[in-house]
Amino acid sequence: MNTPFDEEPHRGPGLLARLRGAFLTGLVVIAPVGLTIWLIWSVVGWIDGVVLPLVPQTMRPEQYIGINLRGVGVIIFLMFTVIVGWIAKGIIGRSLIGFAERLVDRMPVVRSVYSGIKQISETVFAQSESSFEKACLIQYPRRGIWAIGFISTTAKGEVAQRAETGGRLISVFVPTTPNPTSGFLLFFPEEDVTELDMTVEDAAKLVISAGLVYPNEKDPTRPPA
């Protein structure tokens, strides 16, 4: 018989709590996979909807196999893009592109739209070997507050000449959270930049996750993975 002074036996989580935990765990596993598949499926369908109407009816695969295969438009688009890129690298292609760009430069509104889209495309898709060299720590926006940045290059030209500093200037890109593609380009004296051992990819994950995802092998406060 229990007395009023006896402690109540410890009870584990109830059935509803266990079901809720299992549901949330399953959601964490399913959501990324499901959203990725949905996104790819939607993009493929959108490309098919844009490309296939431009293909003659007699050349469409469904005329021969009887079913509409999703992804045919993507294959046609990839083949067309490769052919255009191959032609653009030649002398004739460069001449045609130069002529078309000179023609566009004479159109006030079209010129602004084209130049903006071209600049974005070159930034995102151009094959370039230049990339951020290392991740670093800098004191920003004031002394005593530290931020993660990415070292790009050493400042050159007028920026390096006019800056009132006795040493080298380092150009550092300071990303925003959770979107690291936007941020600020800042120039720091070399002695004010502290290089990190973590890779640029690990630093980007840290920024995107708002400080929740640390590279364990570089973070002494967490156990190794």
Image (cartoon, helix red, strand yellow):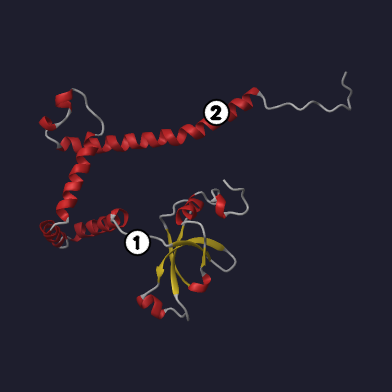
Image x and y of residue 214, in percent: 55, 51
Image x and y of residue 48, in percent: 23, 35
Amino acid carrying label 2: it is: Phe
Disc 1 crowd rating (10 Å Cα; few below 14, some 14-19, many 20+) is: few
- Quarter holding residue 107: bottom left
Image x and y of residue 222, in percent: 61, 50
Q: Is label 2 in a helix, a strand or a loop?
A: helix
**Viewer-proximal residue among 140 and 77:** 77
Amino acid carrying label 1: it is: Ser
- Quadrant of the image for the N terminus? top right
Tell me the residue that label 1 is attached to.
130
Q: Is label 1 in a helix, a strand or a loop?
A: loop
Marks 1 and 2, how far apart in space?
A: 45 Å
Q: Is residue 19 left or right of residue 113?
A: right
The label number, if any, that marks residue 43 in the structure image = none
Q: Residue at x 52, y 73 (%)?
A: 191
Q: Is residue 50 visible?
A: no
Asked whether the beta carbons under mark 1 and mark 2 sit within 8 Å of each other, the answer is no
- Residue at the extreme top: 1
**Viewer-proximal residue among 133 and 80:** 133
Q: Is residue 24 left or right of residue 200?
A: right
Tell me the residue that label 2 is attached to.
23
Q: Is residue 224 left or right of residue 151?
A: right
- Quarter holding residue 59: top left
Disc 2 crowd rating (10 Å Cα; few below 14, some 14-19, many 20+) is: few
Figure disc tally? 2
Q: Residue at x 33, y 60 (%)?
A: 129
